[in-house]
Amino acid sequence: VMAVFMFPGQGSQKVGMGQGLFEKYQDLTSKADAILGYSIAELCLKDPNGEIVQTQFTQPAMYVVDCLTYLNKLEETGGKKPNYTLGHSL
C-alpha cells in the first residue's frame, strides 16, 4: 500500500490551524518561537494583529504547522513514513 502525505500551502492559512499540535510538540514550538521572534501558536490560533495573511507570517506558519502535522501523522501511522510527500508553496 502506497502512502502519500499532502500538505497545503499559502492561501489555505486560517486562524485556528495547528490546533493541538503546538501543545503536543512544545519543545519544537518553543524552538520555532525563538527563531521567529514571536509566538507561532498565538499567530496561528488567535492572530490578534491580523498578520496571518501577510506572506512574511504565512510562510513560516505554514511550514511549522506542516512539519508538526508530519510528525503527528508519523505517530498515528506507527512511524510508517510515506512513499511520497507533496505540497504547495514550500
Image (spheres, rainbow, N blue to C red):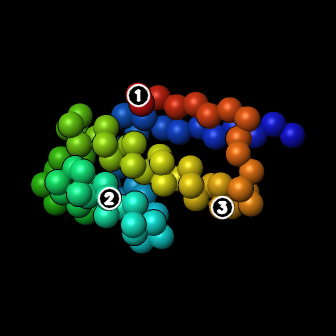
Residue at 12 percent of width and 54 percent of height: 49
Looking at the picture, how far across and down is residue 38, in whole percent?
A: 18, 57
Q: Nearer the viewer, residue 13 or 72?
A: 72
Marks 2 & 1, CB-CB < 8 Å contact:
no
Q: Secondary structure at mark 1?
A: loop
Marks 3 & 2, CB-CB < 8 Å contact:
no
Looking at the picture, how far across and down is residue 41, in whole percent?
A: 31, 62
Report crowding for label 3: few under 14, some 14 to 19, many 20 or more residues within 10 A (C-alpha).
Answer: few
Quarter of the image for the C terminus: give it.
top left
Residue at 65 percent of width and 55 percent of height: 74
Q: CA distance from mark 3 to mark 2?
A: 20 Å
Vertical position of residue 52 compared to residue 86: above or below: below
Residue 83 is drawn in which quadrant? top right
Say which of marks 3 and 2 sits in front: 2
Give the residue type at disc 3: Glu
Report crowding for label 2: few under 14, some 14 to 19, many 20 or more residues within 10 A (C-alpha).
Answer: few
Reading the image, the residue beneath label 3 is 75
Residue at 52 percent of width and 53 percent of height: 69
Reading the image, the residue beneath label 2 is 31
Q: Residue furthest left?
A: 49
* Marked residue nearer the N-terminal end (2 or 1): 2
Residue at 31 percent of width and 37 percent of height: 59
Residue 47 is drawn in which quadrant? bottom left
Quarter of the image for the N terminus: give it.
top right
Q: CA distance from mark 3 to mark 1?
A: 25 Å
Give the residue type at disc 2: Lys
Left or right: residue 16 compared with residue 71? left
Q: Nearer the viewer, residue 31 or 88?
A: 31
Say which of marks 3 and 1 sits in front: 3
Say which of marks 2 and 1 sits in front: 2
Reading the image, the residue beneath label 1 is 89
